[in-house]
Amino acid sequence: MKKQLLTVAMALLGLCSFAQSGGKISGNIKDGGQQAVIDAASVSLLLASDSLLVKTSITDKEGNFSFENVKEGNYLLMASSIGHTQVYSNSFSISASVPVFSAGTLQLLPYSKKLAEVVVSSKKNFVERKIDKTIINPDAMISNTGASAMEVLEKSPGVTVDKEGNISLKGKQGVMVMLDGKPSYMNAADLANYLRGLSSTVVDQIEIMTNPSAKYDAAGNSGIINIKTKKTRQVGFNGNASASYGQGKYQRSNNSLNLNYRKNKVNIFSSLSGNFRKDYQQLEIYRRYMDDSKATEAIFEQNSYEKKKRQNYFGKIGMDYFAGKNTTLGFVFKSGYNKGNNNPTNLNYLKNPAGIVDSIVSAYGSEKSIWKDNGINLNLRQQIDSLGKELTADLDYIHYNSTKDQVFDNRILNADQTLKSKELLIGDLPSDITIYSAKTDYVHPFKNGLKMEAGLKFSNVKTDNYAGYFNVIGEVKTIDYDKTNRFKYNENIGAAYVNFSRNIKKWGIQAGLRLERSNYSGHQFGNPQKTDSSFAKTYTSAFPTVYLSYDANDKNSFGLSYGRRINRPSYEDLNPFMFFIDKYTYGQGNPFLKPMFSNNFEASHTYNKWLTTTLNYSLTTDMQAEYFEREGLATVIRTQNYGKMHNVNLSFNAQLQPAKWWSTMVYAEGRYQNYIGLFNGYNVNLKAANIAVNMNNQFTINKKWSAELSGFYLNRESEGQIIIKQLGQINIGVQKKVLKDKATLKFAVSDLLKTMNAKGYIDFKGTYASFSQHRDSRIATLTFSYRFGKPIKGLKTRKSGGAADEQNRVKGAN
């Protein structure tokens, strides 16, 4: 008992002593070339959260410096000297338990031509591996010049984009795509169009998380992809501008401007981008319908060519106001405008079992679409004390509005191509989505190293979709009630989470639990030929997460994690009405769809910080998949729950530097999937295995010139009934720094060998179908980018480092 009292007394004495005198920081500054000490060097003590200046010190004749009476908190050091480059330390903490910190020796490299020739520039890698995520830096690849966000995703390791723009992660569909940390709430088609219109020049990073913590929304069966647009907090006025021109079969252009101004308590940032592109899609479809004995009943062949033209504009403006040392208020306003014009031409051949043409349908169409999105975010960050206690809050309002005007002009011909009849159908498809969201997060670190995170979130989504179709005979329009429908959907999700983490020597432990209660309802409006219908459902689900890491030594680290996730049906898939795609293809939703639940396990090993091996296993229940069903000569696409899926993925990620002038990233993965269940009345046990490889080579020719050779290969892909054959591309690029390194000129060619042609087939329940898709994928692009402005000397923040995570936590900073 006496020993315990003595221990407590000593601890209290230490706390009192710290409260009176504060912490102490010391270190030494040397010349990195001559290894000589540097006297009179300037050393700044900065807050790790936002790089604000706390104190300054000057080194003595031995190059030593120190700071005393330092309050508890997280800090970093910046050292500089005349004729030398600046250097930053990693972040560190001062507390009652750790009142003294030694920074060791910080080395400043001199500005000399001789050393400049051997020092490797600190440019970002295309892929960065973190404990809980993979980070993609679009600007690090020359071939991303002039590309869209969707095209960057296609090149990202572990990510697959199919011909419709659906995104898969490590072979699993059901990815939650977030924009600046907020769920997009768009359906797959609208999201694909949005990402194809979002310029990579306004994208800062893409975060890929296969097993997110309890802090994040549980939606996203295979994980989360968070697309972060650019924002800088550099002091002073600065920015960059970019303009590009690309030429494939058709031309395209991509232009952007990013501006930032920070002074005193105000930081203002903005982005503006606009692009114009023409594209095409050539699609060939072959369908063979069979009876139960596999005898051919009919054959359908379709050859289509669709010319596409799109204009996309994106704008963002925001402000951070540093109301006090510990308080930051902010807002972000975003707006987008996309205009599309598609003109498809189809030739459909209907053949008898012998392959002889019975009739021909010549179809001409057009679709003019406009998509508008506006959103505003209000945010607060309050640092409660210097120990790291922090409260953040976000309020979001997002509104999407779209219109589509469609024309289908079908001409039915006899086998000898004489006109049999004509059909003219026009469609009016407005859509409206409104989202409200509020959330708050709290961080509480304890003095024993334990950290607690907790938060609440509520979101409301309302959608209103109308599809009005009219048959036109002469000048008379008549509404087609078989195709016309209106569907309204309302969804409320409330969530609460708690997460604990702690490091104990070489071990890292994290455990969390998230609860989400979902309440949704849908209303299908009736018409004179269709009955009114509605549905509603409420359920509560728990989503535990566990992480364990172990640093065995300097060269080997291990990790284990588990997480449960959900993939809710899309609003479109819940709409029971049959919607029109073309004369022989329809889609229909299913209001009885249940959400998918996935249990995800991951084990990883990192060797010497350059080779990461990861093994993933997931079991998904109530699996959702599209199935294709014949109704007469038409194909109807429906979605249903059918059973479970086992998914095993083994991946290797290597960051290598074979030579000083050559750095390479190699990512390879093998996948195995097993689908088991009752699929449209049939017992299925489908197995599929495939291999995917990504490679990115960056070559530094000299201080001004650099080059790239990159690409990926996928031997096959399985998506329920659909089997996608091999797919891949090779990209090349070269860049030169000009105008005293303030500007860059880039030239790149994507899909050099034009191998991004999707081919596949379906063989299920009396129908065999194959398809081949070609698009304008080989693009030569020339880009000029320019950086301007000058930061205020001595107070600029770093691009990355120990404070990067803290900076990203400033809401709106994404």
Image (spheres, rainbow, N blue to C red):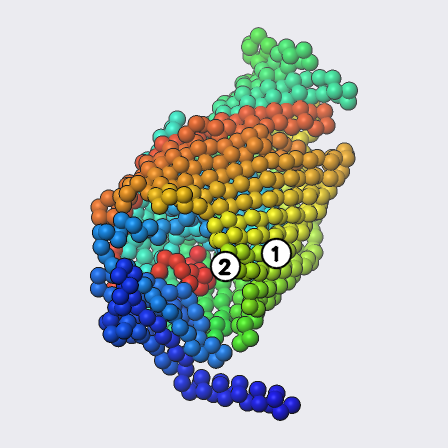
* Label 1 vs 2, first from the N-terminus: 2
Q: Residue at x 32, y 57 (%)?
A: 260
Residue at the farthest bottom position: 2
What separation in Å lies between label 1 and label 2 (alpha carbons)? 19 Å
Q: Please say if 355 is above or below 739.
A: above
Disc 2 marks which amino acid?
Asp
Counting from the top left corner in percent of width and height, residue 74 is at 43, 71
Q: Please say if 240 is above or below 277.
A: below
Q: Residue at x 60, y 59 (%)?
A: 547
Point out the image quarter for the N terminus.
Answer: bottom right
Q: Is residue 336 left or right of residue 739?
A: right
Other-residue count near label 1 (Cα within 10 Å), few / some / many at <14 / 14–19 / ≥20: some
Q: In the depicted view, which residue is nearer to us: 77 or 110?
A: 110
Q: Quadrant of residue 587?
A: top right
Q: Is residue 433 visible?
A: no
Other-residue count near label 2 (Cα within 10 Å), few / some / many at <14 / 14–19 / ≥20: few
Q: Nearer the viewer, mark 1 or mark 2?
A: 2
- Label placed on residue 560: 1
Q: Please say if 212 is above or below 43.
A: above
Q: In the depicted view, which residue is nearer to us: 362 or 142?
A: 142
Q: Please say if 643 is above or below 70.
A: above
Disc 1 marks which amino acid?
Leu
Q: Is residue 527 left or right of residue 191?
A: right
Q: Secondary structure at mark 2?
A: loop
Counting from the top left corner in percent of width and height, residue 522 is at 65, 48
- Label placed on residue 794: none
- Label placed on residue 554: 2
Q: Secondary structure at mark 1?
A: strand
Q: Residue at x 66, y 39 (%)?
A: 673
Q: Quadrant of residue 246?
A: top left
Q: Quadrant of residue 753?
A: top left
Counting from the top left corner in percent of width and height, residue 306 is at 48, 26
